[in-house]
Amino acid sequence: MALPKTRISRARGRKRRTHYKAANVSYGSCPQCGQTKMPHRACPNCGYYRGRPVISATE
């Protein structure tokens, strides 16, 4: 198995792995309140996720 001759610095390794993180994040609308939210996350406005309240709403 091949091994690197020298250690790759943390900055260089992270720079190589950033290509997928720079992609635009798609937003959806919350079915409960209609606000925009990130997918697979609880709504920051109403606190619902998949039709259930999971966090207390801050209003």
Image: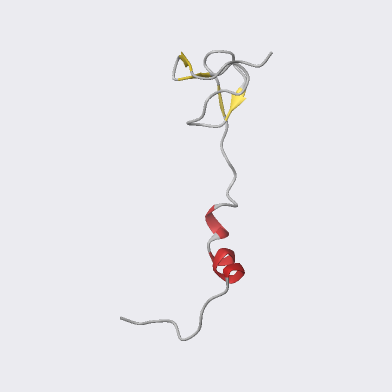
| Residue under the point 44% across and 20% down | 50
Q: Which color mode does the image show?
A: secondary structure
Q: Nearer the viewer, residue 55 or 17?
A: 55
Left or right, residue 11 beside residue 42? right
Question: Which of the image's four quarters has the N terminus?
Answer: bottom left
Q: Is residue 13 above or below residue 36?
A: below
In this picture, is 59 found above or below 29?
Answer: above
Q: Position of residue 21 (x, y in %)?
A: 56, 52
Q: Identify the residue shown where x is 66% and y is 16%.
A: 58
Which of the pair 46/56 is nearer the observer? Answer: 56
The image shows a total of numbered marks equal to 0
Q: Position of residue 7 (x, y in %)?
A: 51, 79
Q: Most extreme residue toward the right, as rendered? A: 59
Q: Position of residue 14 (x, y in %)?
A: 56, 64
Vertical side of 26 occupied by 34: above or below: above
Q: Residue furthest bottom?
A: 5
Tell me residue 24's x, y (percent).
60, 44
Residue drawn at x 52%, y 16% as measured from the top left: 31
Q: Is residue 5 left or right of residue 1?
A: right
In the rendered image, which quarter is residue 44 located in? top right
Q: As rendered, which of 40 and 10 lies closer to the eye?
A: 10
Q: Looking at the rendering, which quadrant does residue 12 occupy?
A: bottom right
42 relative to 35 in the view: left or right = left
Q: Quadrant of the C terminus?
A: top right
Observer-nearest of 35 and 9: 9
